[in-house]
Image (cartoon, grey):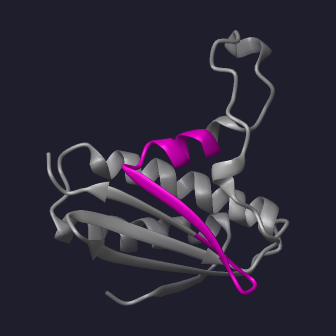
Amino acid sequence: MAVLSVTASLASLPEVREYVLGQARRAGLPKGAEQKIDLVLEEILVNVANHAYRREGGPLEVDCFLRDDSFCCLLRDWGPPFNPLEAAPPDVGQDIMDQPIGGLGIFLATTMPDHCAYERLGNANELTFCFTRKP
């Protein structure tokens, strides 16, 4: 599968969705996985665009691949180091009206996949998330 290179911005979201969801369909993911992938993609792309590149845009690479019996997606950006797997989880027991803004999206994006990993390689952040192809 080819690597998709885009500018990390909200305007790129439709192109990233089309690419990744198309690859996911060809990989034969079970029903319901597409919606989860879409939510994960949106959350990660919005965070990279808003925080890594401070809404000024910057390079983002998207690579989809099969590993064992899973469909995986790797998102690579060159923003400051940020490991979303180390983010403090939100207090889901707190009343929604009292919840501070932020944190829930990262929590969902890193816990919804069957596997999620972060690595800082050189000056790049690499977040890989995988979904099992078995129903």
Which residue is rendered at x = 81% and y = 26% of the image?
100
Q: List x then y, in percent, for residue 135.
A: 14, 45
Where is the N terminus found, in terms of image quarters? bottom left
Choose between 3 and 129: the one closer to the eye.
129
Whether 47 is drawn above or below 33: the answer is: below
> Is residue 120 magenta-colored?
yes
Residue at 37% x, 60% y: name it: 130
**Residue 30 relative to residue 100: left or right:** left
Count of marks, rendered view: 0
Residue 108 image-quadrant placement: top right
In the image, what residue occupies the spot 54% across and 48% down?
110
Would you say 74 lies left or right of 105 here? Answer: left
Residue at the bottom extreme, as displayed:
2
Q: Residue placed at 79% from the left, 14% from the top? A: 98
Q: Nearer the viewer, residue 9 or 112?
A: 112
Residue 105 lies in quadrant: top right
- Give coordinates of residue 127: x percent, y percent: 56, 66
| Magenta-drawn segment | 106-126
Vertical relation: 9 (above or below) 62: above
Give coordinates of residue 16: x percent, y percent: 48, 71
Can you give x and y, in whole percent of width and height, for residue 66 in the image? 27, 74
Q: Is residue 134 left or right of residue 18?
A: left
Front residue of 121 and 1 = 121
